[in-house]
Image (spheres, helix red, strand yellow):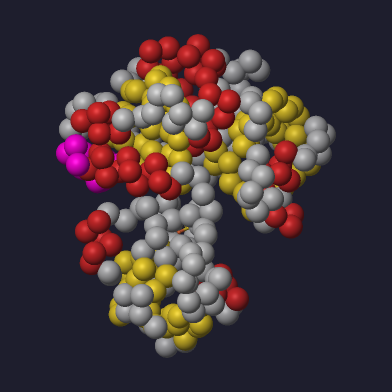
Amino acid sequence: MKLILDQVVAESELIRVMTFRSASGDELPAYTAGAHIEFDVGSAGKRSYSLLDWPTARDGSTAGRPSGYNIGVQREDAGEGGSQAMHALNVGQTIEATAPQNNFALADGPEPVLLLAGGIGITPMISMATALQQQARSFQLHYSARNASRMGFAESLKTAFGDAVSFYFDDTNPLDLANLTGSLASDTKVYLCGPRGMIDAARSAAVAAGIDEESIHIELFTSVETQSGDTAFEVEISASGQVITVAADQTIIEALESAGIDVMYDCQRGDCGICQCDVISGTPDHRDVVLSDAERASGKVMQICVSRAKTPRLVIDIS
Ligand code: FES
């Protein structure tokens, strides 16, 4: 799709809400809560942003019938330049984007829902809270930020969702995960979105409180980072026997694509599960957040967008 930037509103010192409309005037595809679109930000690559849907959008736009797409972009000065490139867009400029995709959808059902957001991970949760409110389903939204100046959307959240929202600040009122998850009904569906540290801690706390891992859904707000000590390894494609070297600063997907092999993937953060492959031999070094502890321990599947190898060679099935 070609989109045109229609409006920019500063939500906080670092966060801007950007509204895009169709550049051609065609109707925009509908989406569901948790969906994202991916923008082509030129030399900074592709960047995904969750779509924001409020119960009372000023222009009447809804997820089911959008007149525009709203996203919240937090400027990351230490990042790779994607958010800075988005902030540098001027009203009236056009940009290429994919149609909405959703790897973080709400499951149907009557069970209570816990939405837990860290930082800019609040953006998909706003649309989820809107959808849950429209469906008259029971939910709690817990939103944590480093401090008050880093938190966007607080006033709008209070207006839209009242007592269903709780706010936490690392410096003055930190989130107590054990206390929060300890009070949940065992059939609660949990949705987590935020930075890696918060996600890992929240998932562990929820599992310790008796929540089934299948009921915990995750979206990360970080991109792949190499770790010091990462080394090259080989990947063998089981069907063809082709062997590809994955360099220390490459992901398996990048190495496969460089070798002309197409694979399915989306998030490239290890949270959507789309790139999952069977492991025939070798030991994966799991770095995703989508597999359960049991799946990780089995070593039989892996996410090739982020995970690496603990053995010199992995044999994988990418069919
Ligand atoms: S592409 Fe999403 S987990 Fe790999």
Residue 261 can be seen in this image:
no
Residue at the location (21% across, 30% down)?
A: 182
Which quarter of the rendered picture does the C terminus lie within? bottom left
Which quarter of the rendered picture does the N terminus lie within? top right
- The quadrant in which residue 177 appears is top left
- Residue 4, magenta (yes or no): no
Instruction: Count the numbered circles shown.
Output: 0
Relative placement, left or right, of 32 versus 86 is left
Residue at the location (42% across, 65% down)?
A: 307
**Foreground pick, 23 / 188:** 188
Q: Which residues are magenta?
A: 208-216
**Is 139 above or below relative to 244?**
above
Residue at the location (49% across, 18% down)?
A: 157
Residue 12 can be seen in this image:
yes
**Foreground pick, 101 / 268:** 268
Q: Position of residue 87 (x, y in %)?
A: 73, 38
- Residue 210, magenta (yes or no): yes
Relative placement, left or right, of 85 versus 167 is right
Residue at the location (64% across, 25% down)?
A: 11
Q: Position of residue 287 (x, y in %)?
A: 40, 60
Image quarter for ligand 1 equals bottom left
- The quadrant in which residue 134 appears is top left
